[in-house]
Amino acid sequence: MAHHVKNIMRVQVPSTKIWEVLRDFSSLERFAPTIESSPLVNDKSSGLGAKRLCTFHNGSNLIEEIIEYQEGQSFKIEISEHSMPLKSQHAEMKVEKVDANTSEISMSVDFVVKGGPFGWLMGFFIMRPLMKWVTKNILTGLAYHSVTGKLISSKMPPKEELTLVIKG
C-alpha cells in the first residue's frame, strides 16, 4: 500500500527564479540539505529522461530520473538503484506563479515500503514523518537558494534569514 506526503510553501520568490534552479537537474546539492552531490549520469541536463546520481552526506546514494516534465511548471521523478527498503518511490516538484514576486512551490512523494504489513507500519510511523521533514527542508532550501544564490550545506540557514523568503 502506497504512502503519500506533500508539502506546499508560499515564498517571496518569482516563479521564474525558482524554475531557473530546478531546470538544472544536477543542482540538487545547492539547495537540499541532505544531498552532498547530484551529478548527471546521462547527457540530458534537464527535461524528460534527465538522470542524476544523488549522494547523501552519509555516503548512500540513489538514481533519480525525470519521467514527466512540464517546462516552467513541474516535473515528476522516479528513484532507482537505492538501498532503501522501498518497492517504489516517485516525487513531484511544482512551481506556481502567485504574482510577480510570489510563488507557491510544492513537493509530493509517493512510496511503497517493502515487507508487507510490517513495511506499511514502518512507512507510516517512520518514513512518512521523515519524508515530510525532508520535503519541507528541500522546499525551504530551494526558496532560499533561489533568492540568495547561497549554497545550503547539511545545516539550514538561521530562521531570521529564512523568514525573508518564506511567507507564513
Image: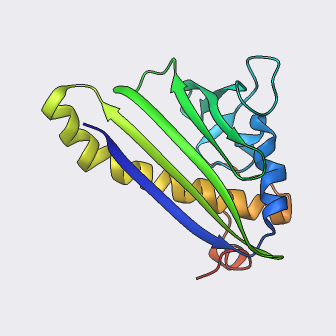
Locate the C terminus by quadrant. bottom right
The relative height of residue 161 versus residue 119 in the rendered view (above or below) is below
Q: Is residue 92 visible?
A: yes
Place of residue 25 in the rendered image (x, y in percent of width and height, measured from the top left): 75, 36
Query: Relative to the observer, which residue lies in front, 138 or 2?
Result: 2
Furthest-left residue in view? 117
Relative side of 155 to 48, left or right: left
Q: Quarter of the image holding residue 95? A: bottom right
Residue at image position (75%, 47%) is 22
Locate the N terminus by quadrant. top left
Q: Is residue 156 visible?
A: no
Relative side of 43 to 63, left or right: right
Place of residue 69 in the rendered image (x, y in percent of width and height, measured from the top left): 69, 39
Place of residue 76 in the rendered image (x, y in percent of width and height, measured from the top left): 59, 39
Residue at image position (56%, 45%) is 92
Residue at image position (63%, 73%) is 10
Residue at image position (56%, 27%) is 59
Query: Relative to the observer, which residue lies in front, 83 or 36?
Result: 83
Relative side of 60 to 118, left or right: right
Q: Quarter of the image holding residue 140? A: bottom right
